[in-house]
Image (cartoon, rainbow, N blue to C red):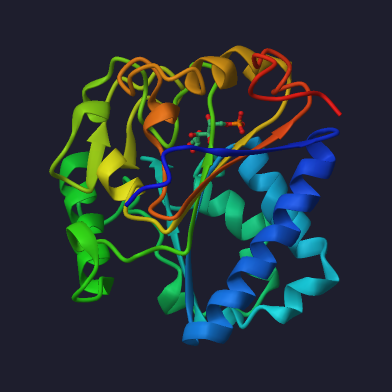
Amino acid sequence: MTAAVPQLVVHRDKELMAQAAAARLITRIVDAQSARGTASVVLTGGRNGNALLAAIAASPARDAVDWKHLDLWWGDERFLPAEDGERNAVQARAELLARVPVDPARVHEMPASDGADGSDVEAAADRYAKELAAAAEPGDRLGVPAFDVLLLGVGPDTHVASLFPEHPGVRETERTVIGVRGAPKPPPTRISLTLPAIRAAREVWLLAAGEDKADAVALALSGPGELQAPASGAYGRTRTLWLLDRSAASALPAELYRPS
Ligand SMILES: O=C(O)[C@H](O)[C@@H](O)[C@H](O)[C@H](O)COP(=O)(O)O
């Protein structure tokens, strides 16, 4: 079962989108933890992903989360030295993770280029795939944990994670994690979950704000193939949610979104 038919929620502006998405994510984590004692979330890099983390950090409700029983993963990472400020994990630490009592053993950063695999990005990707498989439950698909929420920023070319239009990574159907070279968005070398891994999530939430995303959002939601618009291939098993601001929704056809 998939939730390939997306739900759209459009907020007044990107600031309100970040605040509302933060409240939504806190609630979703609390619900998962009350049901199962634990939760797992896949973080995304980019301005909207980081704004969401900052909004959680600033929220009084953040203490409702049992941070010690939360597994955090990444959808993609820039393949740079571990402490490089351009890494998604370094930015996530600064925005939120250094301010809440997470269990470091449950914060699963993607390998860095100065780690055990050196500059071998494919070996680093395989390492992360093994870490995901080790965390999967017997019933989980593909050897990937059934993430409660998988967050994705959406690029102006409709990329998600580090899966770019017409790039080979979008076609991957077997592996859960791949190395990416020649990414159009710098830096060129990255690690990324693949679409099959993304689709193993219970819920996939896509974040897009700003006029520069309007065409990408309209294209991705018009039903093109995922090779042309990778965001259109990002959906969850039970829910696919597009969190937008009005600017990013401004090119949508009337039947998809009526401005309030
Ligand atoms: O490593 C990255 O750069 C991100 O994971 C990338 O997929 C990002 O989410 C989109 O490019 C949207 O970025 P913005 O939210 O900054 O537009």
Query: Who's the residue at 41% across and 59% down the image?
Result: 109
Q: Can residue 180 be seen in this view?
A: yes
User: Which residue is painted at 60% across and 59% down in the image?
Assistant: 93
Decide: is 172 above or below 45: above
Classify residue 11 by image quadrant. Answer: top right
The image shows residue 26 at horizontal and vertical percentages of 68, 67
- The image quadrant in which ligand 1 is located: top right
Q: Which of 114 and 87 is in front in this view?
A: 87
Specify the quadrant that holds the C terminus. Answer: top right
Q: Which of 7 and 51 is in front in this view?
A: 7
Q: For this rendering, which residue is in front, 24 or 178?
A: 24
243 vs 197: above or below: above
Above or below residue 134? Residue 127 is: above
Q: Is residue 81 above or below residue 254?
A: below
Residue 137 horizontal/vertical position (percent): 25, 75
Residue 35 rendering spot, x and y as whole percentages: 52, 84
How many discs mark residues in the rendered view?
0
Residue 107: x and y in percent read: 45, 69
Q: Nearer the viewer, residue 46 or 252?
A: 252
The residue that appears at 48% across and 81% down in the rendered structure is 38
Is residue 194 visible to the viewer in this orientation of the structure?
no
Q: Image point 15% across, 48% down: which residue? A: 123
